[in-house]
Amino acid sequence: MTMIKKLALFVMISGVVVLVSCKKTNDTSARLTPEKVEKLVEEAYFHCFPIVENYKAMYAYSILKSSPMYLPMNTVKNNTYLFSPSDKIVVSPNNDTYYTTASLDLRAEPIIIKVPEIKDRYYSFQLTSLVTDNFGYIGTNTTGTGAGIYAITSPNFSGSLPEGVKEIKSPSEIVGLFGRTEVNADDPKDVESAQAVQRQYQIDVMHKFYPEFQPKEVPPIDFPTYSDKDMAQPKFFALLNFLLQHTKLSADEQEIINSYKTIGIEAGQPYSFYDSHPEFQSSIKNGIAKGIVKIDSSSRHLGRVVNGWTMFPLGEYFGSNYIDRTNIAKMGIYANSPFEAYYPLAFVDSNNETLNGQNNYTIHFPADSLPPAKFFWSLTMYENKTQLLVENEIKRYSIGDRTKSLKYNKDGSLTLYIGNSRPPSGIGNWLPAPEGDFNVMMRLYGPQEIVLNGTWTPPPIKRIKE
């Protein structure tokens, strides 16, 4: 072989070596370390927790056909009962209103919501995206008491709507609908009236109301299975990838999600990073475990603490406020935005000691400082570990200004009793507690300005000295 041919062969071989070397250098997984993977997984888990936690309820209510709560997508359920300890799907449920719920698939056509004139009670329809942002409201506090027709449209919808129909554009193709209708369960006539209002809500796909509108042909969605254990397993990220393809993220959040691509997070793609990188499997598991611990810790400090009450953040929910979004998904997913309802939350008493049913407590509202709500207010009891309602002998899970047995003091002030044992004064003002640790959530429906500007906070919960 001539010297020139040998040199050419060397260059060709060297070229191949260089190309192979460059390809290996550009492989992002080659630059990852176990420590970096663990950190990225922890961050991704914390940031994306609300998206997958949302799927938990969606799966039980709209996907799993064997579920006792199952109804197909775009099918509305009017609950004519108040939530109780037997309801275990959604954390921190309210015990004040009848729920009207549905999972909406907007891919083929908009969903129409028709509401009647409602002047005798509070109602609202909260519209929540896949990432749990509250992107729209219909109801007493936002659109008023008059009748109205609304179209919930997908992020890709660009058609025209019939005259008189108001558009509410969703950032995701799948939407959670959470309607709340005020009811006083102590009053049989009010129960009947509230249920009559629910029956007047009309919610369905657009062509059912406007036959001239032709829906698009869309393929059925192959929803993945879900179980509670998935939240602590690598499958969490498989569920995440599936869900991300059905929402349009803001530019800043899309940039955050893009930063997790190196650990296998990408909209609509199979999650294979765990199986294809055995060298990182322990790091992935550790990252998930740390993410769970971080959420548990962070959610207990989701706002400023005053008088022992954690005051939920004020302002719009949730936008780029991703930390609060995760904290609220943990403590009370599908919470209303502050202007609609506000939720002070107490884990401790006036001495900063954990609330526990072995003790008895009072909370005293002066006559000039009763909870400032335009519509009504309540105080609801939850068990700490599960964040669910607490079973008790008198079947009372919340107490508030509509509680029939409530007795005010002669000066117009109000004293409530909280604990596992009946107070000597009777059960009229008693909110029963479990035997162990608990927390109490206040709900102010239509909070007044002194709440929204941060100048009002509830009085402390004080332990009764035996």
Image (cartoon, rainbow, N blue to C red):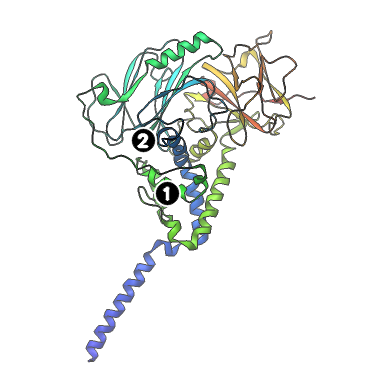
Between 84 and 22, which is closer to the camera in this rendering? 84
Give the percent coordinates (x, y) of residue 26. 37, 64
Residue 391 in the image, given as x and y percentages of width and height: 62, 26
Earlier residue among tags 1 and 2: 2
Residue at image point 46% right, 14% down: 194
In which quadrant will I find the C terminus? Answer: top right
Q: For the residues labelled 1 and 2, say whether their Cβ atoms are less than 8 Å apart.
A: no
* Quadrant in the rendering for residue 144: top left
Image position of 401 (left or right of 212): right
Give the number of callouts: 2
* Residue ID for mark 2: 174
Q: Residue at x 58, y 46 (%)?
A: 293
Name the amino acid, label 2. Ile
Circle 2 Cα neighbour tier, 10 Å, few/some/many (<14 / 14–19 / ≥20): many
Label 1 vs label 2: CA separation?
A: 18 Å
**Residue 106 horizontal side relative to residue 392, left or right:** left
* Residue at the farthest bottom position: 2
Helix, strand or loop for disc 1? helix
- Residue 375 image point, x, y percent: 50, 15
Judged left or right of residue 25, residue 12 is: left
Find residue 238 and name its label. 1
Of residues 224 and 279, the one nearer the viewer is 224
Q: Amino acid at mark 1?
A: Ala
Q: Residue 360, can we see it? A: yes
- Residue 387, quarter of the rendered image: top right
